[in-house]
Amino acid sequence: MTRLRWLLLALLILAFVAGWGIYWWWQCTTLPATALAALEKAENFELISLEPSDQTSEGERFQGNLVLGRTTIHDVAVQQRLIEALKKGAAEGPWIGDKCFNPRHNIRVYGDGKMVDLLICFECKQGEIFLNGGRVSGFQLSDSPQPVFDKVLQDAGIPLAKPRH
């Protein structure tokens, strides 16, 4: 009887660990539902270029980063291209991002009386989500969306941050 209890306990622990692993994997390979819903229902959609290392220049700042420029994305096809690139990056992302956080991109959307920001660091493979200015969660992603984001900014004449060497 004791052997059966130990076996059941071991199976229960194994099921818990496996379930937690699947849950953690799912959380790390998808954009949080709140962010995805905000992106897909946005009434106003902006892409912002940031310089994370410039702490001395004057100008507008977002979460301590210098704003290099911003563009409002009116074209729904461009919005979808950015969203799909972001979803793909989240699916490819690591379980854990690097310890640094040097964001160079931000998507800001407005809708349902809310402002949602996705502050993104492709270098560190992570992002942070802000609701009305307050941080609500984070996510991991690969750097694969960066060329899509950079092209949209460049096409709008917005400067990009200096690459880190």
Image (tube, rainbow, N blue to C red):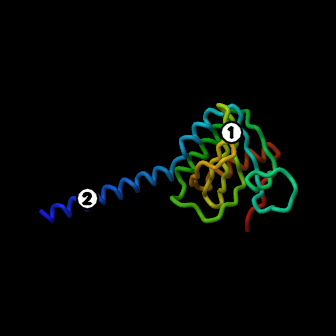
Please give the name of the residue rendered at 69% of the width and 45% of the height, measured from the top-left corner: 133
The part of the image, by quadrant, that contains residue 116 is top right
- Tell me what residue is drawn at x 81 percent, y 61 percent: 54
x, y (%) of residue 119?
67, 50
Q: In which quadrant is the C terminus drawn?
A: bottom right
The quarter in which the N terminus is drawn is bottom left
Task: Please tell me which of labels 1 and 2 falls first in the chain.
Answer: 2
* Quadrant of res 24: bottom left
Tell me, for residue 12, which label it has, or none.
none
- Inter-mark Cα distance, 1 to 2: 46 Å
**Residue that numbered label 2 is attached to:** 11
**Label 1 neighbour load within 10 Å: few <14, some 14-19, many 20+:** some
- What is the secondary structure assignment of the residue under circle 2? helix
- Where is residue 130? Give x, y as percent: 65, 46
Q: Residue at x 62, y 41 (%)?
A: 83
- Dot 1 amino acid type: Met
Report whether 18 appears left or right of 143: left
Q: Residues within 10 Å of mark 2 (few under 14, many from 20)?
A: few
Residue wearing tag 1:
115
164 or 25: nearer the viewer: 25
